[in-house]
Image (cartoon, rainbow, N blue to C red):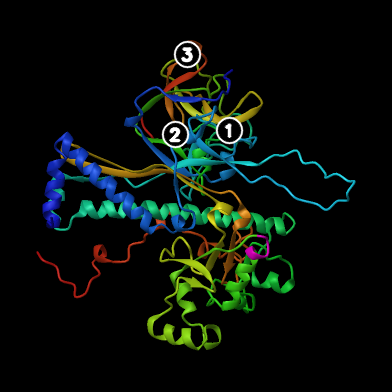
Amino acid sequence: MSTVQRINFEPFSDILATQRRDFVLGDKTLADPMNAVALVDGEWMVINNSYQIERATSIVGANGAVPAVAQTSYVLFAERGRTDVRAMGVPKMPLLFMGPFEGDTRIFDSTQSAATDGAPITYVGQPLQVATITIGTRKYTGLVGRTATGTTAIVGRVTRLPSNNSGKLRFVRASSI
Amino acid sequence: MSMSGRMLNELFAQKLSSADGKEKIAEYGGSYIRDRLREVSFARKIIPPEQVTRADCQRSVNHDTLVKIVDVEPQSKALTMSFRGQPSARFIRGPKAEVAFFTISSEMFQKTEQELLAYEMPITKIIEENSVKDIQEIEDREFITHCDAACQALQTEANGGVSTALNQSNIALGAVVEFSVIKGELARNAAANDATVRPIQRPDIVNLFKTLDGNRLRCERLLMTEPDWDDILQWTLEDFGDRVQSETAVDGYKYNTVLGRPYVRTIKTDILRPGNVYAFTRPEFFGKFYVLNNTKFYIDKIANTISFQSWEDIAMSIINIAAVRKLELYSADANPTTNADSLLANFIPRDEDQLGAVNNRVDAGLKFPQVSQF
């Protein structure tokens, strides 16, 4: 079981090669650190029809829920309650939007099987998908394992298992398509 | 020294081939940018920015951001008493507010050296100037967004903590309290809740003053759009009096104050939308605008591709939300929470990516006469 800390996602590769893009938050209350369901770094977001971002899965639903449509998701690159985000009249949060990167995340559940194409995280090179997970006492949208064949979007592949990486999952994202 | 735009473009590309040249161009761009920014932002005329350094700011233990903590005046009062009595005590405490920093940046402009030579105009210089204006626009947009949020927060409080639509029909029913947002005389007497902007009347401005003047504050500055200002030129003899009416008919209104208060006008009607007039106190009662890093200019050339970008790090906060009030000259509801008439998009700043819409249609082939050279 992972644990959520102050820093939950860290790039392990050069971020100059990755385009970081700020998007308007669909629900600006999620930037408030006092919100019980505030966004944390390492959660996965999708772009909605208003070109704003929202969680890739509704964390109100059951664990294992996958995005409503098989679209790709983007990792959130801002810690909970950052003041530069909240200073803006219309809060925006940065995503690692385009380009490959490798990163360490705490927002994953290696045992949770997603509702579609779900599989525990067990091996290096395994595809990863996004689903609703529970860490501690609340839910997040994080990484879970995926079967080798399936229809859900692959958002990355395991490069280092948590058991060999101080409890963090290291993964590589090759494409945002 | 004057030079043609084409020469400037060539020099621009040549200078970027050396480290010394890059530095010189960046210095040139940087100094120019700072001058223009002070001139054109209306937010800076209402809250003059203060330069701060890292030493003035506080860090967060949770993430790598900076805030500046501002003290707010503590409460105190006096009381009458007898010779034998003693005053009530106050364990003193002053509120404190955090003002957070964020970045406003231009786009990253890119062009190849060869294509740069295809321009007669100094396109890089123009973009430098435009990027300053773009940054200034976003500053103003942030400012207006904060001002409206402050007005609506106080308006909600005055309506018992409930966001209540402020439109002509609710005013007629007596269903809403006008406290920090008021409607103009013509808007409140309109036949329907609509987005039509009515001409500003002299009593509208006086009523706006009263929203501040009646709360132990004083209106010291007005902010309005040029179209709303133009309606002031339509004031009649009864409003202006004989002398000012005569002057205005010939020279326009030439005074720095209206009804005794200074004003700021803006042509940025996609940020401050026509029909919205704001009143402010002096900055020391109102809020803070800090500049951590003045506009920086980055430029680089990799192979034949030139890239340049400018940005600034600022903080802007309305700490005393009672120090700004709003006059609405349209009859529909402009409360973002209620949006009772579904006309909100007419009254709030346009989205960032919609600002500065292109007016000309040259790229669409619309120019007259339509002549093309082959």
What residue does disc 3 label? A165
Q: Label 2 belongs to which residue?
A: B54
Name the element at disc 2. Answer: helix
Image mark 3: chain: A
Q: Could you tell me which quadrant the C terminus of chain B lies in? A: bottom left
Label 1 to label 2: alpha-carbon separation: 45 Å
Q: Is residue B138 magenta?
A: no
Residue type, numbered disc 1: Ala
Would you say the magenta stretch is mainly helix, strand or loop?
loop
Give the residue at x 51% y 57%.
Answer: B144
Q: Are marks 1 and 2 in contact (CB under 8 Å)?
A: no
Quadrant of the drawing holding the N terminus of chain B: bottom left
| Figure quadrant of residue A154 | top left
Nearer the observer, B264 or B344? B264
Q: Can you name the residue that lies furthest to the left here? A: B374
Residue depicted at 66% across the width and 41% down the height: B94
Side of B341 relative to B107 (left or right): right
Amino acid beneath label 3: Asn
Residue nearest the observer in this picture, B205 or A154? B205
**Residue sitting at x 38%, y 81%:** B251
The mark found on residue A65 in the picture is 1
Q: Give the image location of residue B132, x and y in percent.
A: 33, 52
Tag in front: 2 or 3: 2
Q: Which residues are magenta?
A: B212-216
